[in-house]
Image (tube, rainbow, N blue to C red):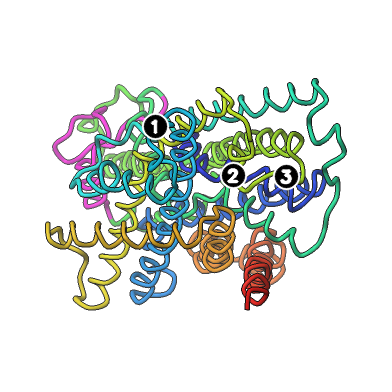
Amino acid sequence: MLEPLLIQILGAGTVTLPFAFKNAGLISGVVLIISAYLITVFSMRCLIRACHRLHPRVYSYRGLAVRAFGNWAGPVIEIVLSVLTLGFMIIYTIIIGDYLALLATEYLPFLPIMHHELMVRFVAFIFVMFPLCCLKSLSLLSFTSSLAVFCVLFTMLFLLCSSVLSIAQGEAAVVTGNIRWWRMDMQSFIAINLFSSAFAAHFTLPTVYQELKKKELTLLSPSETPAPRSRTASVGGGITMASITALGSSMEPELTQRKGDAVDNEDDLEAGTPSPEPPYPALEATEPLGSLSPVRRDSAQVLRRTKEARIVKSGADRDWRRVSISILTGISICLGVYLVVGISGYLQFGEDTLDNILMSFGASNVGRDMSMAAMAFVILFSFPIIHYACRQSVLNGLCTIFLRRDYRFGWVTHLGSAGILCVITLLVATVIPSVSFVFSLLFSLIGTSIYFMLPAIFYLRFRPSFQGKDASRRTYLSELKDKSAWGAVALIIVSPFLGALSLYCTLEPVVKALLGKL
């Protein structure tokens, strides 16, 4: 789960982190980014716990919303996620225009028409991005995910080396005193927006978790966990979907009675305490079933099937601690990268830091140009992937609302929706050419709900489904001792206020500027 999680989190938001430190100050920025990290870890844990414990399991954000609120929530979540992904498309378009226009100015001085951001974006859309968005399958673009992580790490190393060099030469802002160590005012909420958005991967996290469970079910060690078998499979055969399906349909009534006991012990498995073995007689591996008495044969079959059912569930239950550690490790690595990028950029440029750190370098710089070229290449080929997710959300949401069914592929709809989304993205990126503003606006309007509030609601809503069934654990006092539930309640209460304050801080400078012009 570590690699997919890094791929989902590390991205274009990295270049805005020095600007976030500018709005927060150096020390307060470190405090805020660590706070965003801790809140993100908790909200992701709530989200994964819901996917992990629900029976049957749900592996999509829309599925969780439908299970929590009903069928009406499906198209609503689809539309909300389409707006969120459209915002990411706009951010990518802004960045690609800034980078390619600057590179063209440096290395193509004989093409002055390509020195303007609008023209560069238009050419990039016509010849690269829109044709790729029209593809029916995006499997050829899967290489861009790992490449994006490499480019972010390269940018991190460049910024770190550049900052150290500028400090050694006495040119850095930290040497000249052009930085703030502490700042707590309304502008700090812009930093909170950028820090929280940089860690966000919630709407794709259930899918990442599903991929992890697929790998674990295919890699269970036969020596430790013998594989379940179907009616026709031999003992010791591999775990397949057919065998799991057959296993579920062939359970004896006695096993059904013990299913509640297996569910009762899930919290013990999560905590690392093994569940007690079923109270059936031990069966020697070499003892054939046919040589047993009918009573003991039935007990042996139920014992075997109970173990097999527990193995099928072990892909979730027994490995919950490993899943939690994977989430914590992945986000911690991202935190380290973000701290290096944010602190290095701010120490070098201080109060002159722009919302895209690579644009803060005034003179020609080979390292900066290499970072820009690498990021531009990744954005060009990653844009169609985000576009695909946005288009599917829009079409699924609209088809569910008006046609009462999911979207079915058609070339006219496919090409038409691709063109409309590209035009909207290009127009908005031209009118609002600020990466930090779009990030802040998305977080204020949608991010606080998708990243914080809804995962907490999912946890509280599904909590009775995966809590222990013992009467001693259903008392009022035991409910009050659930720290995760109290944390989820606090997150639900704080999220609307955080969104409102963030929206105010984001729009206030824009409104003042417009009123000043009038």
Residue 9 among those drawn in magenta: no
Left or right: 456 in relation to 136: right
Question: Hey, which quadrant is residue 148 in on the image?
Answer: top left
Residue 3: in sight, yes or no? Answer: no
Q: Where 94 falls versus 226 (above or below)?
A: below
Q: In the rendered structure, which segment of residues is drawn in magenta?
A: 224-252
Q: What residue sits right under mark 2 in the picture? A: 356
- Lower position in the chain sequence, tag 1 or tag 3: 1
- Label 1 close to label 2 by CB (< 8 Å): no
Tag nearer the camera, 1 or 3: 1
Residue 261, image x, y percentages: 46, 54
| Percent coordinates x, y for residue 149 in the rendering | 48, 32
CA–CA distance in space, label 1 to label 2:
26 Å
Return the x and y of residue 329 as percentages of the image width and height.
59, 35
| Sequence-first disc among 1 and 2 | 1
- Disc 3 and disc 2: Cα gap in Å? 11 Å
Query: Which amino acid is tagged 3?
Result: Asp
SS under mark 2: loop
**Callout in the foreground (1, 2):** 1
Amino acid at the residue labelled 2? Asn
Q: Is residue 199 above or below residue 190?
A: above
Residue at the spot x=46%, y=42% of the render? 8
The image quadrant that residue 357 belongs to is top right
**Residue 228 on the magenta span:** yes
- In the displayed structure, does residue 277 sit left or right of residue 312? right
The residue where tag 3 is placed is 352
Question: Residue 41: percent from the left, percent from the top?
Answer: 61, 48
> Quick one: 30 or 478, which is closer to the camera?
30
Which residue, given by chain and number where applicable, does mark 1 sit on?
A: 110
